[in-house]
Amino acid sequence: MKKKLLLILFILGFIFSVSAQWIIQASGFATPNRGIRYICAVDTNVVWATAYDGSVQSAPEIQEFTRTTNGGALWQAHTITGYTGWGLSMISAIDSMTAWIPTWNGAGGGAIIKTIDGGDTWTQVTDTEFAAPAGFPNVAHFWDANNGFAMGDPNGGYFEIYTTSDGGDTWTRVPQADIPNPISSAEYGTTGLYSVVGDIVWFTTGKGRVYKSIDRGYHWTVSATPNTTDQLNIDFKDANSGIVMSNQSPFNTYYTIDGGTTWQLLPFTGTLYTNDFCYVNGADSSWVSVGADITGGNAGVSYSNDDGSTWSVFTGTDTAQFLQVAFPSNKIGYAGSFNTDAVTGGMWKYAGNDFPTDSCAGFAANFAQSIDMVDMYVSGQVDFTDASTGSIANYYWDFGDGNTSSLNNPTNTYDSTGTFDVMLIISGPGGCADTAYSTVVVINTSFISENFEQSGVKVYPNPAHNILNVNTEWETGTIELLNSLGQCVYRMESTQSRNVIDVSDFKTSLYFLRISNSKGATIGTVSIVR
């Protein structure tokens, strides 16, 4: 779904008083008042950006973008032909010639388009994907010339997400079983609001949730922020640390240090602007925020060198407008604005030394495990998948039961019950090191699970993915699922011998299944995996 754009008055008269670190550049658009909707900085020299009409509220969508290959000394603006009336969600580029844009049709449906000649020509690389009326592509991201993913609003009851390994020539939709369901028909994705660190992808929804994939979009989990009603801007500095911000007043901002599993309100001092923010690549703990609402006192650029705890305004920038921001390095950054004409205004470039270099920036340990609780009666095996970022030379795993490993994606089989602390330590060049932790709970329910067989209850499949079938020898009774703490998370009154339970919203874990009627009760275990 389209990202909300504020109506911002076009003001350029004060640009010459801006801090010396920020240099005004001509974005190249011939039509006045072209604002920058989205920036993709491939590196410090190659940058692409899409535009919108900032002259009036609810202006028609335009199909324009600009590109520089020499650090902004020259920006060349283009118009994409053949898509009049379509919106450009964002842009993803891998070099000066190759880029992809997810586009949406106001009448319904959308497509991914691609250029390999610097934007002179564009080819549609999707066919039946994002079909009308519900199809709406929000994001397309490519790691290289071949591997990418695209995300759209829910279509057919679940988020429309695709992966490609041939540059977009063919797309494969991610199965519903690998994507947590939307919480309601009103939950959707948002254009351009996502973040990537290495192979890890996060995107936010209009209900304040954060979807995450550690394998370039093939499998997904979801977490909830304290905000349950708004679109959220998002960016991560490494596999663990990230920030989200609501796009509605009072613009509540939250942070995570565990890869997005949990979110807490970000306490800060100073000025945190609300138009956009980003992590400064190559810096230790530096972030930049921008604002463009001069009449509301929310215009300028601020920065933080302590992961968002304190924010300082670049001197003089509070008299100018800054729309979107991207920092490909700690020395160079770009921020969009509004132009006057083809040779005046529209883009800002930062060239300064305010952000200390961190040789270990982006080096972070992180991993996923196939299940949090295992039952030795079924299997004590747990698979661990590395999701760390950075140039990693060595892995050291401690599974908490005396076993260790130096593999990047190891497997461990537990043979005793208890709660085990798992630790991953990674190290790399220059003394970079980081550690991530988790726990595995191991139980043995052989004496419990035998009750199913003795009571004539059939439960399948086990492990279950989306559907759990429960067949009994009676037609009236109560079926309950309990979590590892003994709390009832699902309950139904059954009036038939064959029962189907939808477990697609349950997280990966071990559950207790309790079936009871007037004659007694039986209990056993089932595993649910995503």
Image: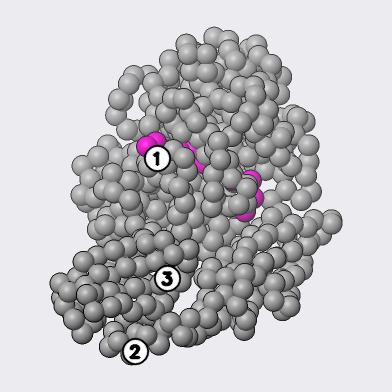
Q: Which residue corresponds to the image point at 50% horizontal and 59% vertical from the top-left? A: 213
Would residue 47 be counted in the magenta stretch?
no
Residue 501 located left or right of residue 428: left
| Badge 2: residue crowd in 10 Å (few <14, some 14–19, many ≥20) | few
Whole-number angstrom distance, CA of label 3 to CA of label 1: 27 Å
Q: Is residue 259 above or below residue 306?
A: below
Q: Left or right? Give the position of 371 relative to 168.
A: right
Q: Earlier in the sequence, mark 3 or mark 1?
A: 1
Q: Quadrant of the C terminus?
A: bottom left
- Colour approach in the figure: one colour
Give the residue at mark 1. 228
Q: Is residue 230 magenta?
A: yes
Q: Between residues 266 and 303, which one lies in front from this camera angle?
A: 266
Q: Position of residue 236 (x, y in %)?
A: 59, 46
Q: In the picture provided, is 58 more to the left or to the right than 336?
A: left
Label 3 CA crowd tier, 10 Å (few <14, some 14–19, many 20+): many
Mark 3 or 1: in front is 3
Residue at the image point whose x is 47% and y is 11% from the top: 295
Q: How many residues crowd around disc 1 within 10 Å: few (fewer than 14), some, or many (20 or more)?
A: few
Q: Amino acid at mark 1?
A: Thr
Q: Are marks 2 and 1 in contact (CB under 8 Å)?
A: no
Spatial CA distance of label 2 from label 1 is 43 Å
Q: Which residue is mark 2?
A: 453
Mark before the other along the chain sequence, 2 or 1: 1
Residue under label 3, please give it: 511
Q: Of the residues shown, which amino acid type is indicated by label 3?
A: Tyr
Residues at marks 3 and 2, CA–CA distance in whole angstroms: 17 Å
On residue 397, the disc is: none
Q: Magenta residues?
A: 228-239
